[in-house]
Image (spheres, rainbow, N blue to C red):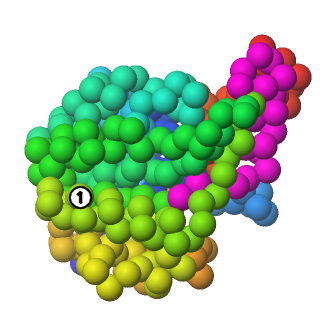
């Protein structure tokens, strides 16, 4: 009797596996298992990742270059895995996202993925939208390349843009203080008025609609619920979307809602198994606003941030 292919693997909300840990990921796939550690209880769990027990793998990344260079997409496809790609492509900013390749390079990577797997297997994330000040300067944001990226994604046939607004985390404050103490600018993230956020989202949605791209909100339930009637091109998002993956690849993925995510804030993700570790897999992009554990965080804790 054929075993139901029900597990969706998330790789990963906790770090950027395609950019920094593809060799490790492929080796664990060859061993047909991962050992995950709950970030709160520290309890280990063995995860079976044989193709016959795995419906699909959902990747999250800001740089698929190393993943593509190692032909990981071909290796996994040849092994029988179905793949989906969450790809964060924001405006170029060495201040906010210092560890990324150039924007043209990242758009080219999106093209490679869309060409190989179809544009429906790629979700473009412009995330998060940031507003901030540098010292006494006026408020800035990271929207400068939004329309340029949207045009490029539309040309590739990608029809989904996922976004949210910056959320404050204690570790971000620690990073910005160290940045200022080591000769960098004093960055203060700001939170726009909800009415201003709604106006911005409505404008983005209308611009994207002209390009046949839908705007999806990640964990922004309050803004979604209060969206203006004229903004029809705004949807809540499931970054792990079991019903869509079932439609895309067949099989029988788990389509129940994931109670472990931020459902009250609007997360509509279905269940998945997230591999990777905040502590064991720090991210070297060193994005200033990131909720995950960065290499910069490690250096700060060790007192050797230069």
**What residue sits 70% from the left and 55% below the top?**
168
Res. 71 in view: no
Query: Quadrant of residue 1 in the image?
Result: bottom left
Span highlighted in magenta in the image: 165-185
Residue that appears at 33% across and 44% down: 146
Where on the picture, by quarter, is residue 288?
top right
Residue 48, x across and y down, in percent: 47, 58
Question: As drawn, is 270 to the left or to the right of 105?
Answer: right
Front residue of 245/194: it is 194
From the viewer's perspective, is residue 102 above or below residue 230?
A: above
Measured from the top left, where is residue 294 in percent x and y?
66, 35
Is any atom of residue 208 visible in this view?
A: yes
| Magenta highlight on residue 131 | no
Q: Which residue is mark 1?
A: 207
Compared to residue 290, the image places residue 135 above or below, namely: above
Q: Residues within 10 Å of mark 1 (few under 14, many from 20)?
A: some
Q: What's the residue at 84%, 23% (across, down)? A: 181
Nearer to me, 227 or 150? 227
SS state under label 1:
helix
Q: Position of residue 257 (x, y in %)?
A: 47, 82
* Quadrant of the image occupied by residue 285: top right
What is the x, y in percent for residue 100? 46, 27
């Amino acid at each position: 009797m054929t075993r139901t292919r029900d597990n969706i693997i998330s790789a990963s909300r906790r770090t950027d596996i395609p950019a920094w840990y593809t060799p490790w990921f492929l080796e664990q796939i060859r061993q047909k298992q991962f050992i995950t550690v709950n970030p709160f209880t520290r309890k280990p769990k063995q995860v079976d990742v044989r193709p016959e027990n795995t419906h699909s793998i959902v990747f999250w990344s800001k740089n698929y270059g190393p993943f593509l260079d190692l032909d990981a997409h071909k290796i996994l496809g040849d092994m029988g895995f179905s793949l989906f790609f969450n790809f964060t492509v924001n405006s170029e900013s060495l201040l906010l996202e210092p560890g990324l390749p150039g924007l043209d390079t990242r758009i080219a990577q999106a093209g490679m993925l869309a060409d190989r797997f179809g544009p429906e297997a790629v979700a473009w994330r412009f995330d998060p939208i940031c507003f901030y000040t540098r010292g006494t300067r006026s408020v800035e944001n990271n929207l400068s390349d939004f329309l340029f990226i949207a045009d490029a994604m539309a040309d590739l046939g990608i029809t989904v843009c996922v976004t949210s607004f910056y959320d404050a985390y204690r570790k971000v404050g620690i990073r910005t203080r160290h940045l200022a103490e080591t000769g960098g600018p004093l960055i203060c993230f700001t939170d726009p008025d909800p009415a201003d956020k709604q106006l911005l989202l409505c404008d983005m949605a209308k611009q994207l609609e002209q390009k046949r791209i839908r705007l999806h909100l990640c964990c922004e339930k309050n803004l979604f619920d209060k969206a203006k009637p004229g903004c029809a091109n705004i949807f809540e998002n499931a970054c792990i979307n079991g019903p869509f993956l079932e439609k895309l690849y067949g099989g029988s993925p788990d389509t129940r809602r994931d109670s472990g995510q931020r459902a009250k804030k609007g997360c509509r993700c279905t269940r998945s198994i997230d591999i990777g570790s905040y502590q064991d897999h720090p991210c070297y992009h060193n994005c200033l606003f990131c909720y995950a554990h960065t290499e910069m965080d490690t250096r700060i804790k060790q007192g050797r941030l230069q």
